[in-house]
Amino acid sequence: MVTGASGGVGRAAAMAFAARGDRVALLARGDKGLAAAASDVVQAGGEALALPVDVSDPAAVEDSAAQAEKAFGALDVWVNNAFTGVFAPFMEIDAEEFRRVTEVTYLGYVHGTRAALRRMLPRDHGAVVQVGSALAYRGIPLQSAYCGAKHAIQGWNESVRCELLYSGSKVRTTMVQLPAVNTPQFDWVLDRLPRRARPVAPIYQPEVAARAIVYAADHPQRREYWVGASTAATLMANAVAPGLLDRYLARTGFRSQQSAEEHEPGSLANLWAPADGGPEGHDFGAHGRFDGQAHGRSPQVWASRHHTAVGAAAVATAAAAVVALARRTGRRDW
């Protein structure tokens, strides 16, 4: 099960699962995007079931899970990915807009995980992958509603994970923290900025995120995975000097999230309705408009998968440096 499967990272993840022959249930609101995503899954070698659903509705999410199991059998993996957001200063976001972002981006994950665990716990088998972000740890300006929801997901997921470990269950949850990704979100998220929203460089292609999500689904014992060197740098800098990062983002965060193109008021936004709906709607696909700037690989993904080896190498390097220093100074007792 992949939520938010009609575009962006969800679309790329669905295709990555399909490439190995998986049965993939696709959850999203937009009919055109869902139909195109289902076609992509079949072409990639998998089986597809398109299920139109708004993940903020717990009953609808539960019904979708039942339909998927009836069609495809026992659920092995649930990927929570659906979200929405608003690009605007905090005081320019209405209360109902803030509520809507929270209900989709945070509570959508809660509803999806609940539906998954209802099925996985009795079988003592399964994995839930929460698609996160560096913004789950580090808030940035102009995305307060989204950052708040991602922070909520982080804390809630840790709580659920602890409960599963306490009970001795073999069901696991894991989280994949993403960097800036070249997805259509920057064309369909509600945008009140003077210039068109853009991801903060470096930007990665959605297939980089998709490969990490598939790996996390197969190896959910790890509590989380980091994708992109920028994610690792941001999380480490925030752990060491969050106040300094506040000031840096205050200086750079407004400019770095806006392109040179002027924003047109009244442009497409998917906060309340799918962006591909209506007679003028179309399928956005997995990629946004930043293909020329996006990276197709991330060495950090390898490092996140092999953190034990990376840590051992770091210790060995540090030990070698100490030995070399001792030899130069004659202090062999070090």
Image (cartoon, helix red, strand yellow):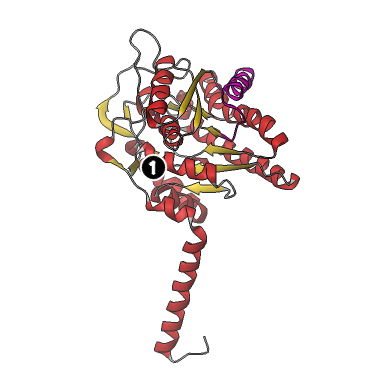
Q: Position of residue 86 (x, y in %)?
A: 44, 26
Would you call the spot at circle 1 few (<14 residues within 10 Å), some (14-19), or many (20 or more)? many
Give the x, y percent position of residue 200: 35, 40
Vertical comparison of 40 with 303: above or below: above
Which kind of residue does numbered mark 1 sit on?
A: Val
**Can residue 189 be seen at all in this image of the molecule?**
no
Q: Quadrant of the N terminus?
A: top right
Mark 1 residue element: helix
Predominant secondary structure, magenta span:
helix
Region of the chain picked out in magenta, as a range: 55-77
User: Which residue is farthest bottom?
Assistant: 330
Classify residue 186 by image quadrant. top left
Left or right: 161 with respect to 286?
Answer: right
In the image, 60 versus 148, the foreground residue is 60
Picture coordinates of residue 75 (x, y %)?
Answer: 60, 31
Instruction: Look at 53% across and 41% down and name the residue there.
Output: 217
Q: Is residue 55 left or right of residue 192?
A: right
Residue 308 forms part of the magenta stretch: no
Q: Residue furthest right?
A: 167
- Is 64 left or right of 294, judged from the image as shown? right
User: Residue 225 location, x and y as percent?
Assistant: 50, 48
Q: Is residue 166 visible?
A: yes
Give the quarter of the image for residue 13.
top left
| Residue placed most toward the observer, 318 or 296 | 296
Circle 1 is placed at which residue position?
Answer: 208
Q: Nearer the viewer, residue 133 or 27?
A: 27
In the image, what residue occupies the spot 28% across and 34% down?
290
All told, the count of numbered labels is 1
